[in-house]
Image (tube, coloured by chain):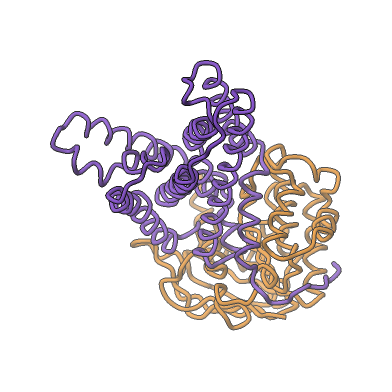
Chain colours: A purple, B orange
Amino acid sequence: MTAIAHPAPFARPSLPRLVRVELRKMTDTRAGVWLLSLIAIAGVTAVGVTLVAGTESDQTLDGLFGICGIAVALLLPVVGLLCVTGEWTQRTALTTFTLVPARGRVVAAKLLAGCGLALTALLVCLVAGVAGNLIAGGSWSLDLARLYGAALYMLIVMVAGLSVGLLLMRSAPAIVTYFVLPAAIGALTQTVHSLRGPAEWFDLGRATAPLGAGEMVAGDWPRLAVATAIWIGVPLALGLLRLRNRELS
Amino acid sequence: MLAISAHSLIKDFGRLRAVDDVSFEVEPGRVVGLLGPNGSGKTTLLRMLLGLVAPSGGQALIGGRRFADLDHPARQVGAVLEAGSLHPGRTARDHLRVLATEARVSYPRVDEVLELVGLTEAADRRAGTFSLGMGQRLSLAASLLGDPGVILLDEPTNGLDPAGIRWLRVLLRGLAAEGRAVVVSSHVLAEVEQTVDEVLILDRGRLLAHRPLSELDSLEETFLDLTDKKEHDACLP
């Protein structure tokens, strides 16, 4: 075997390099391409349906962008979730953590790659909104609060999916937990009147709703902070702890 | 080049002691066979060397350092742990390119190792369509990507055909001749006998022997004597 000339001997891979690897892992398999295509199709379909059946106020750049964002954000967390759980379901964790023993760095790279993908999805929504509005001929004004809100919303759902995936480390339970648990909590808080007040603090769906609509007011931010701490902070911290102590055998 | 060493290594899984006070050293330029019956602790030992399983006691070191403390693990240690640890949806070339990016290895090296393991023709096939032997060859290619000084292989001949086994034997001898330390686990004594310089014999987590192959009259006899398998076989109907 011929020895190779190492470009930078004895230097660990940088975080940007690991992020590039994770982005590639998310997009270079048939399943990954299908999932991302499905997300794009959901966004474009939402714009199409709004153009056909939406109200006049929806057929504007602001409205079309917002509707596309809601459709895209529905499946976006699955990408983040699968990029973690896939390491175990596809048994690639052995290779990944042999190449990069610092497990926290791999998670950081996955988080950053997920955020990059979420912001790319935002751009896709913007393009879909512009294209839709060219057809609709509606208002071109775009509320910056909605734009920033949508960006933050997409980042939150992506990181939440990734955190749940990290905590459970298995695709099916993580997907079920991510979608069913909030729905069950939502249903419960609608049924039990006394929970409606507290639910504003722990129901991520309710806490993030004003974000997507670009209607955040001062009182919404603390509620959003608490809900994200519960849905992102707790699973992420527990997941990291679990990963650190987990034996890969 | 780096040496591999274990110092009083212990691993407990609950109440089961999988590795029990194992110490050894493997010098560069040697091929060492890690032998033992199923469940003797071979895989656990290799995974402790790679930092994938935390020791309950003692130390597993590569070049005098824990695996996690190596400057560039991907360049210093190559490992084959499980032939199935490949994403089935990724082609052989893409699989290696992902690892090459992580290991800071250039893409031409990917084609080089694909050729080395005889997978050039199948480079653009998805790993999910590979036979066990082809998967094993791809795992070997991955382990050689970073041109490492230490190579750890867990049952690398699983799924290989006779020609593949002979090819692997020549490859491992060549790697050791270049000064690399190679540890290869197996429970197939005949194939190990033609490849290794030394043997480590494990049973029920304990290291029963660490000897140069040249000192043994018969590897099979020594192995069976040490692991009490003769008595076990005699009891079989």
Q: Is residue A236 left or right of residue B103?
A: left
Q: Nearer the viewer, residue A72 or B56?
A: A72
Residue B151 picture location, percent across and down: 69, 68
Residue under the point 64% across and 27% down: A134
Residue B212 picture location, percent across and down: 69, 77
Q: From the viewer's perspective, is residue A110 above or below residue A204?
A: below
- Residue B199's quadrant in the figure? bottom right
Count of all numbered marks drawn on residues in the image: 0
Q: From the viewer's perspective, is residue B165 above or below residue A30?
A: below
Residue B227 picture location, percent across and down: 53, 64
Residue under the point 82% across and 69% down: B174
Q: Nearer the viewer, residue A20 or A136?
A: A136
Residue under the point 41% across and 63% down: A245
Say whether residue A169 is visible.
Answer: no
Q: From the viewer's perspective, is residue B66 above or below residue B96?
A: below
Q: Nearer the viewer, residue A154 or B148?
A: A154
- Residue lying farthest to the top in this orientation: A53
- Residue A38's quadrant in the figure? top right
Residue B57 picture location, percent across and down: 42, 76
- Residue lying farthest to the bottom in this orientation: B64
Residue under the point 18% across and 41% down: A197
Q: Quadrant of the N terminus of chain B?
A: bottom right
Q: From the viewer's perspective, is residue A179 above or below residue B102?
A: above
Say whether residue A221 is visible.
Answer: yes
Q: Is residue A156 left or right of residue B168?
A: left
Q: Nearer the viewer, residue A71 or A136?
A: A136
